[in-house]
Image: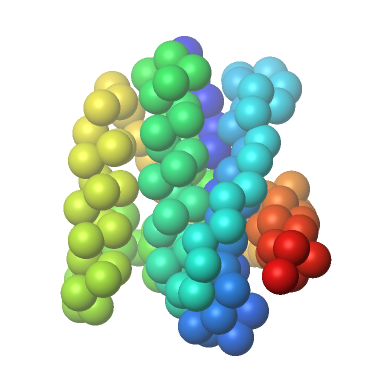
Amino acid sequence: MKLTIYSDGGARGNPGPAAAGIVIKDETGKNLDAFGEYLGEQTNNFAEYSALIAGLKRAYELGGTEIECILDSDLIVNQMKGLFKVKEPTLQKLFIQAYNSASKFRKVSYRHTPRENNKEADRLVNETLDKQAILK
């Protein structure tokens, strides 16, 4: 089953309160799942990787075999494609987690999209951060 993961991560302050937003759609564009995760005090890049990892894990649970990952982080897309090196030690660990999660699928591709084309995942990031701020 081919699935598309739209993922986004963000931190208010970088580092600061961070969250991930994930939307998973089937081939017809129907939402199969959409959720946000609060990540604590982290960087934007940590949040972007965390969103990708969460999306890959959920796509596997949903039975996905071919996955298209759409992110608005050019850095993460290029690192996952092997075009950029991952130099930062924390991101290296997250890269390995993402790589291992992706290896469970028959096919995985990564595509960069402008933020305005990733509104659903971005909205989930902001809703999650707003909810966390209310809880404090």
Q: Is residue 12 left or right of residue 41?
A: right
Q: Is 93 in front, or is 117?
A: 93
Task: Reply above or below: 34 against 22.
Answer: above
Q: Position of residue 37 (x, y in %)?
A: 57, 51
Q: Residue at x 70, y 27 (%)?
A: 31
Q: Position of residue 120 (x, y in %)?
A: 74, 48
Q: Position of residue 109 (x, y in %)?
A: 39, 40
Q: How many marks?
A: 0
Q: Is residue 5 left or right of residue 130?
A: left
Quadrant of res 28: top right
Task: Reply above or below: 105 against 97.
Answer: above
Q: Is residue 136 visible?
A: yes
Q: Residue at x 55, y 33 (%)?
A: 4
Task: Reply above or below: 71 against 85.
Answer: above
Q: Hey, which residue is sitting farthest front in the picture?
A: 136
Q: Is residue 81 left or right of residue 27?
A: left
Q: Position of residue 126 (x, y in %)?
A: 73, 62
Q: Residue at x 43, y 15 (%)?
A: 63
Q: Is residue 85 left or right of residue 112?
A: left
Q: Is 60 in front, or is 69?
A: 60
Location of the C terminus (image quadrant): bottom right
Q: Is residue 118 visible?
A: no
Q: Residue at x 24, y 78 (%)?
A: 88
Q: How is the image coloured?
A: rainbow
